[in-house]
Amino acid sequence: MQETLILIATAMIAGLMMSRLAKLANLPAVTAYLIAGLVIGPFALGLLKVPYLGFHTLESVGNYKLISQAALGFIAFTIGNEFRVSELKHMGKQAITVGILQAVLTTVIVDVALISLHFIAPHVISLSSAITLGAIAAATAPAATLMVVRQYKAEGPLTKLLLMVVAIDDAVGLMLFSLSYGISRAIEVGAISVVGVVVEPIIEIILSLGAGTLAGFALNFIEKFFHSRSKRMSISIAAVFLVVGISMIKFEIGGVHFGFSLLLVAMMTGTVFCNVCSTSQELMERVERWTAPLNILFFVLSGAELDLRVLSNPLVLLIGVIYIIFRSFGKISGAYMSCAMTHTSESIKKHLGITLLPQAGVALGMAITAANLSDGAVVRNVVLFSVLVYELVGPTLTKRSLLAAGEIRPEGRTSARKKNEPKKPVSLS
């Protein structure tokens, strides 16, 4: 137990100290937390095997998965706050159109590139792995995007559309991956499962949205029994922990697998709650402040979890570079085309695609499933390599795009350590 507490404290302190260095380089805090994770991870300080100094193995980092899951739950819950009816009336159609089209186009572009590579050099990548990687390319990480938006207090039409699209990405990515993975399995075993390819993904989405809806109404009902700000915040936090736990439940009935998507359940809880509770905006802001340390831990652990051994495999690097180039092209061109179709502003068309590049947790989850393929290790390592690149570079690109779009307002240097200067009395003469 003492080791757990010491490592949690070490991770938070390392992340915070690294954020000071990142500020000097004008980098987002998210990037600093990820780098801090690499420093105290099993491929840096962890190699020294000094007790309590960093994580010695990837398995030891995995022991803190509960923290990462909880942080993702709060991130999705907060993103649900963007789906207010008032916002949906203005941007709902655009968000759904852009969310679907850019994800599908990215999958098609990456599929074409990797399938072509397969036919040119079959020994480099199998057809099943190429098809699966195409679907994984559609996924976008909401965590890094939201943290950049929070840190720089970004606000405007691009930011609002971005947060909606990132949320929709999870459902679209789930469907695309299930379809592609089902086809890949069919290629290898010679038989396709309609249940696994079509039925189970639809059930997962319906169950997730249903559970989130019930949780949102339940939170609104229970919250009315409490009047102090601290207790209302506490019940909101308890609700998020509850939906995170529910989303981990999996079971099987009659050969059909049932499960939930953490991001969809938590996001739907936040969406319903913010639309039925009149004081939800205040509660959301208080919950966001409470989860700040949890988010730091999430990104530091994510950095420590990055497997640097993939950099030693030339084959993985080759496929990874192709994957990154064509995924980036797919996201940017797909966002531009779909924005043009929905008549968004020139600024949104130009900058949205770049903000969709970060990739992490959802993609890694898909890669773990894809490990069942004959060369699933290739899929996993390519995704690990892309996550390493996107997570370190993506937040900075997101910041620059929001800044170029005029949605990050430059602020003077401020310090919470300084006392507020008393206002000078106004002369009426």
Image: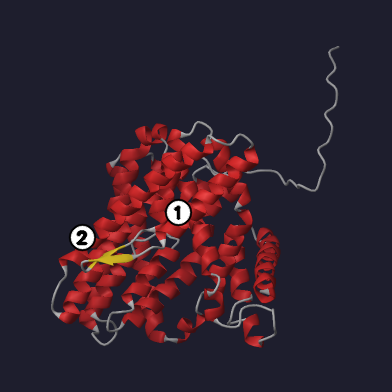
Disc 2 packing (10 Å; few <14; some 14–19; many ≥20): some
Work out which quarter of the rendered image holds the C terminus and state it: top right
Q: Which residue is at 24% across, 67% downward?
A: 180
Helix, strand or loop status at disc 1: helix
Tell whether 353 sits left or right of 10. left
Q: Is residue 218 above or below residue 332?
A: above
- Amino acid tagged 2: Val
Q: Is residue 38 above or below residue 236?
A: below
Residue under label 2, please give it: 199
328, 276: nearer the viewer: 276
175, 309: nearer the viewer: 175
Q: Which residue is at 25% across, 84% downward?
A: 121
Work out which quarter of the rendered image holds the N terminus and state it: bottom right
83, 349: nearer the viewer: 83
- Amino acid tagged 1: Val
Gap in angstroms between the C-alphas marked 1 and 2: 23 Å
Q: Is residue 142 above or below residue 15?
A: above
Q: Give the quadrant of residue 292.
A: bottom right
Helix, strand or loop status at disc 2: helix
Counting from the top left corner in percent of width and height, residue 270 is at 45, 44
Instruction: Say which mark, if any, is on residue 93.
Output: none
Q: Which residue is at 37% across, 50% downward?
A: 211
Tell whether 133 sits left or right of 271. left
From the image, state whether disc 1 or disc 2 is nearer to you: 1
Sequence-wise first label, 1 or 2: 2
Residue under label 1, please give it: 243
The answer to whether one can see residue 334 in this image is: no
Q: Is residue 330 above or below residue 303?
A: above
Counting from the top left corner in percent of width and height, residue 172 is at 30, 55
Counting from the top left corner in percent of width and height, residue 85 is at 39, 34
Counting from the top left corner in percent of width and height, residue 360 is at 45, 65
